[in-house]
Image: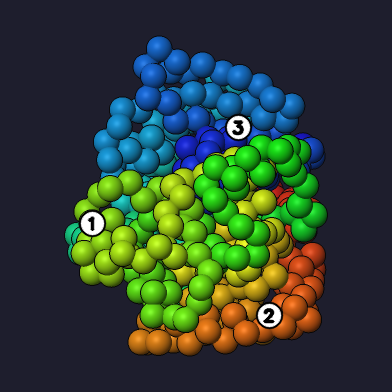
């Protein structure tokens, strides 16, 4: 048994995003190893509170809300906590997985401390954070520098897409210590409470097979502006439901001003949704799914879509194409690219859509189940500890 410490997410079973999904599913599907995960809390009274769930030990670490800097300082606090924890408990066979490039410039300091304790470091750079539109030029430069240090001081680098691995290998000449391991999902979707889902549909006036669906964060690099404006230009009579934390912020107001989506009754913001039953039900009953993510690796919401929705339209970037292959439609930012694709998809026969759905399911079963992903991580653990 190995001791695996995961740093960089907000914690186990935390309703937020990709990292939290990854941590939760990795822990839940790996009974061979013991996991240690810090949980971000903004309640100072809970600081250092420890809880146990099967093969998981979770500690709550207090960090005040600091906007962009929250995860930076939380990551540092977490690493410091576990350095002391490893010393005090004389832990052996320890691997620390660091998610994202948050603390690169100070990695040399922590690498030396962890190395002296016999700890091996696996890092996952996520996507190309320094390319995300939501960051200004200074923050983008900081992420690029941070990426360089993280890659240099890691014993192994896990890339969750082949395209990211190719970039890391080429940029830093480290192909000897990089691996491709994607995210995972479940091909068999089970809904525990169907009545709850039907109530949600009734409350929101949603009709099965009569809508396209978007699920993701409300950020510019997910091409929400292109999706909305192009959908409005399409001939589709179906709704476009956006499941996202849109809140009335500057980006939301910008979209409203540029697209005037509030004048088109087909465009409906449903808000964020973390209930797995409802999300699955939304995907299962969608006519089609539109995936606009343009920065990052293998995205969890894309895998969920391919495992549930038969007709999928993806933004044309290498990370998405390596997953969807020829079983999905693709669009770009070029004018009319998406609107024409939607018009074509609206005319597809049930037979054509069923064929695409079967192909998407085969992709998931053959490449992206959690059993496959966890097995790859266990082999990597053996390799790292063996080194």
Residue 153 horizontal/vertical position (percent) = 45, 55
Disc ID at residue 36? 3
The CA span between labels 1 and 2 is: 35 Å
Label 3 crowd bin: few (<14), some (14–19), many (20+), radius 10 Å:
many
**Image point 67% across, 51% down: which residue?**
281
Of marks 1 and 3, which one's residue comes earlier in the chain? 3
Residue 186 horizontal/vertical position (percent) = 74, 54
**Image point 56% across, 18% down: which residue?**
50
- For residue 192, which quarter of the picture? top right
Q: Name the residue under label 2.
A: 327
Q: Name the residue under label 1.
A: 253
Vertical arrangement, residue 376 with respect to residue 197, above or below: below
Residue 377 horizontal/vertical position (percent) = 70, 53
Label 1, secondary structure: give it. helix
Question: Going by the image, does 167 lie left or right of 182?
Answer: left
The reply to whether residue 376 is visible in this rendering is: no
The CA span between labels 1 and 3 is: 41 Å
Question: Going by the image, does 379 lie left or right of 210?
Answer: right
- Choose between 285 and 2: the one closer to the eye: 285
Q: Which quarter of the rendering shows the C terminus? A: bottom right
**Image point 60% across, 69% down: which residue?**
288
- For residue 319, which quarter of the picture? bottom right
Of marks 1 and 2, which one's residue comes earlier in the chain? 1
């Amino acid at each position: 048994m190995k001791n695996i410490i995961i740093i960089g997410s907000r914690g186990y079973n935390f309703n937020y995003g990709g990292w939290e999904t990854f941590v939760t599913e990795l822990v839940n599907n790996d009974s061979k190893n013991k996991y240690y995960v810090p949980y971000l809390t903004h309640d100072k009274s809970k600081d250092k509170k420890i809880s146990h769930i099967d093969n998981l030990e979770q500690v709550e670490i207090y960090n005040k809300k600091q906007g962009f800097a929250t995860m930076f300082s939380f990551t540092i606090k977490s690493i410091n906590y576990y350095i002391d924890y490893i010393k005090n408990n004389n832990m052996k066979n320890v691997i620390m997985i660091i998610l994202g490039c948050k603390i690169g410039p100070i990695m040399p300091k922590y690498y030396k401390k962890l190395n002296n304790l016999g700890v091996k470091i696996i890092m996952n750079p996520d996507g190309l954070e320094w390319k995300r539109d939501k960051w200004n030029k200074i923050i983008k430069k900081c992420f690029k520098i941070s990426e360089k240090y993280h890659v240099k001081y890691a014993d192994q680098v896990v890339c969750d897409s082949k395209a990211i691995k190719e970039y890391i290998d080429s940029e830093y000449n480290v192909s000897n210590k990089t691996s491709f391991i994607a995210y995972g999902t479940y091909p068999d979707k089970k809904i525990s409470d169907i009545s709850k889902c039907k109530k949600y549909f009734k409350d929101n006036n949603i009709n099965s097979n009569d809508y396209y669906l978007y699920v993701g964060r409300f950020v510019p690099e997910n091409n929400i502006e292109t999706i909305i404006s192009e959908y409005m230009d399409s001939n589709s009579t179906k709704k476009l439901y956006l499941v996202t934390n849109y809140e009335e912020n500057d980006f939301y107001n910008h979209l409203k001003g540029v697209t005037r989506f509030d004048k088109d009754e087909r465009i409906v913001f449903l808000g964020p949704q973390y209930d797995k039953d409802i999300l699955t039900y939304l995907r299962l009953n969608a006519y089609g799914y539109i995936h606009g993510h343009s920065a990052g690796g293998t995205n969890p919401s894309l895998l969920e879509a391919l495992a549930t929705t038969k007709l999928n339209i993806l933004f044309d970037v290498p990370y998405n194409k390596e997953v969807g292959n020829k079983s999905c439609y693709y669009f770009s930012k070029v004018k009319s690219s998406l609107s024409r694709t939607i018009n074509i998809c609206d005319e597809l026969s049930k037979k054509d859509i069923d064929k695409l759905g079967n192909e998407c399911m085969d992709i998931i079963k053959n490449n992206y189940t959690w059993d496959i992903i966890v097995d790859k991580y266990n082999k990597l653990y053996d390799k790292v500890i063996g080194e």
